[in-house]
Amino acid sequence: MNRNDQARRSMLSVIGAAIAAFSLRPQSAHAQSESAARTFQPARHPEDEWMDTVPGKHRTVIDCAAAGAAGTGVFYANNIFTANRNGYQLTDADVAVIVVLRHEATTFAYNDAMWAKYGSVLSGLVKIVDPRTNQPPTVNPLNSREFGQAMTNNGVTASALTGRGAHFAICGMATNRIAGVIASAVKATQPEIYKELAANLLPNGHIVAAGVVAVNRAQERGYTMLSAG
């Protein structure tokens, strides 16, 4: 072997050792952060497992915060089922829909029995009256076709929607607040009213820690978000 060959081999050895040493260096903080972002997987919690029990090939979560958004959310949800049936020949069981009732919209999360009992208080929270009597409603307006235009749900009822398989995520924080208002009005305790409300939700209703958290958890589980206002 001549001297030139020996020099080339020596140089290649040095370069190889340098590359090996560089590859063994610890990642920088920035590189580690980028790597972690690429491999991020959200934590799972048992409180949210019900979201995966809703059957469907496509998943949508509808966020309703304002009082008027409750009816809009029900209307949007019904449209999702209908459009998937008419446009894609899918069944209702192929479509998973969760309607989140939070903030002011939480007022409409309770069944007719609660509206019959506490309608004067609940209606006062959202400034709504029965258009036929001009008095506080005695049924949940989401379950009344007569409220269709006022609630912007065009006559689609919450009961009909749950019959198609939709579920409701109901804000626990707002329910606590509403329970306090009712308790003050009827001279009861907040915990007992909260317990009563939580036991009398709309069909397919689930109390969640907070509506905003439910929107986040649903998206982490593959639901796309639609805002109803």
Image (tube, rainbow, N blue to C red):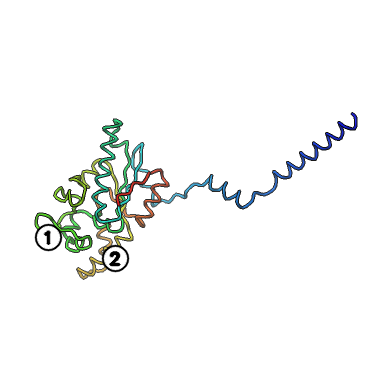
Who's the residue at 26% across and 63% down the image?
A: 178
In this rendering, the answer to whether 58 lies above or below 124 is above
The residue that appears at 29% across and 40% down in the rendered structure is 80
- Which comes before the other along the chain, label 2 or label 1? 1
For disc 1, the neighbor class at 10 Å (few under 14, some 14 to 19, many from 20) is few
Given the image, on which type of amino acid does mark 2 rest? Answer: Pro
Q: Nearer the viewer, mark 2 or mark 1?
A: 1
Task: Please tell me which residue is depicted at 64% across the width and 49% down the height of the picture.
Answer: 27
For the residue carrying disc 2, how many other residues have a C-alpha within 10 Å: few (<14), some (14-19), or many (20+)?
Answer: few
Disc tally is: 2
Residue 167: x and y, percent? 29, 46
The one of 57 and 224 positioned closer to us in this rendering: 224
**Residue 119 x/y as whole percent:** 17, 60
Q: Amino acid at mark 1?
A: Gln
Q: Which residue is mark 1?
A: 135
Q: Residue furthest left?
A: 133
Residue 138 placement: quadrant: bottom left
Residue 191 circle label: 2
9 relative to 69 in the view: left or right? right
